[in-house]
Image (spheres, rainbow, N blue to C red):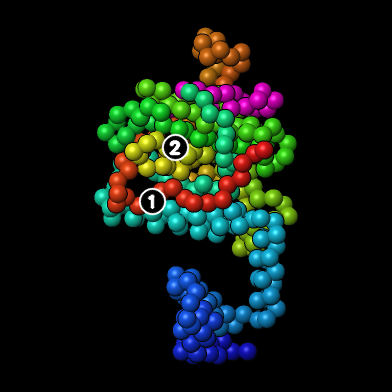
Amino acid sequence: MPANLMTKKDMKELAAEAAGSAAEGGNPRVKEVTERLLYRVMQVIDECDVTMDEFWAAVGFIAKAAKNNEFGLLVPGVALEHFLDLRLDEADKRAGIGGGTVRTIEGPLYVAGAPLSKGEARMDDGTDPGEVFIISGQVTDEAGRPIPNAIVDIWHANSKGGYSFIDGEQAPYNLRRRIQTGDDGRYLARSIVPNGYGCPPESATRELMGLLGRHAERPAHVHYFVSAPGHRTLTTQFNFTGDKYLHTDFAFGTRDELIVTLDRVTDPAQIRDAGLNRPFARATFDVVLTKETATAPKTVVEREHVIAA
Ligand SMILES: [Fe+2]
């Protein structure tokens, strides 16, 4: 069947009618987006001459992703979560805001309500045989002034690439902590060096990546939400130099400004000073928050989050 069977006018009219554009009532915003979305989907179907079998296979794919609760994975996998970040970067630039730590994706694996402590925290429960990891950093404003009482909410995978609560193998809130910065804006976390991870083997997202000829893996990373009164909440993460998937993250989360180098400490005196009895890794991750103003683009995202029971 040849493509472009329908005229632009036919498709526009059909999309508008389906979106209730001329109908009374409803939500104008939903109507507008629905009309444009439908029109573009119709265009793609027409231009690519999508067959009925292909169309229903796509519907089946979406249904599978929904059944598995995978949209939080699929959205970054097709670069849309990164795209939203790029748009927010652009909005910041237009508002004259710069100088803060760059943002990147939240991903699907945040669990709200992690234990809160002042100044420092141990994030692992001692059962992970991985490499001990000391993360330290300071939260400051754009002028370099320390921000006391900022909340640094950190979460990451274990040495097998699994997340507590999600993988069902770890204690609730393992490797998830909120640390309140001290008067000097500093925080310190003792944890375990995380591993990267991939999409689950049977997931719709991995299936799609296969069809696209892409891998479905993420490099190792550590997620952050950082908030403080009077400042804009930051969603970010850092990655590690030398990671196999550093620049091909399937979720488009890596940003050049957010790559840290692990310092491997083997000197016995330094190990002792750190209160440890074996070599460990350490990294610094400082965070600069921008000031909250009435006109600054919103950075707090209303998004459903689970809370571990
Ligand atoms: Fe992650």
Task: Name the residue at 57% across, 43% down.
Answer: 110
Q: What residue type is labelled 1?
A: Lys
| Residue 243 found in image quarter | top right
The one nearer the camera, 68 or 54, is: 68
Residue 25: % across, % down? 48, 77
Residue under circle 1?
298
Residue 95: % across, % down? 28, 53
Q: Are there few (<14), some (14-19), or many (20+) residues within 10 Å of tag 2?
A: many
Task: Name the residue at 66% across, 71% down.
Answer: 59
Residue 229: % across, % down? 37, 36
The one nearer the camera, 18 or 59, is: 18
- Cα distance between the residues tagged 1 and 2: 14 Å
The one nearer the camera, 234 or 238, is: 234
Q: What secondary structure is marked by label 2?
A: strand
Which region of the structure is painted magenta?
Answer: 119-138
The quadrant of the rendering that contains the C terminus is: top right
**Magenta stretch encompasses residue 276:** no
Residue sitting farthest toward the front? 25
Residue under circle 2?
226
Q: In this view, does 291 lie above or below 249?
A: above
Task: Name the residue at 70% across, 62% down.
Answer: 64
Q: Is residue 305 above or below residue 44?
A: above
Q: What secondary structure is marked by label 1?
A: loop
The quadrant of the rendering that contains the N terminus is: bottom right
| Residue 70 found in image quarter | bottom right
The one nearer the camera, 231 or 107, is: 231
Q: In this view, does 196 lie above or below 140?
A: below
Task: Name the residue at 52% across, 25% down.
Answer: 117
Q: What residue type is labelled 2?
A: Val
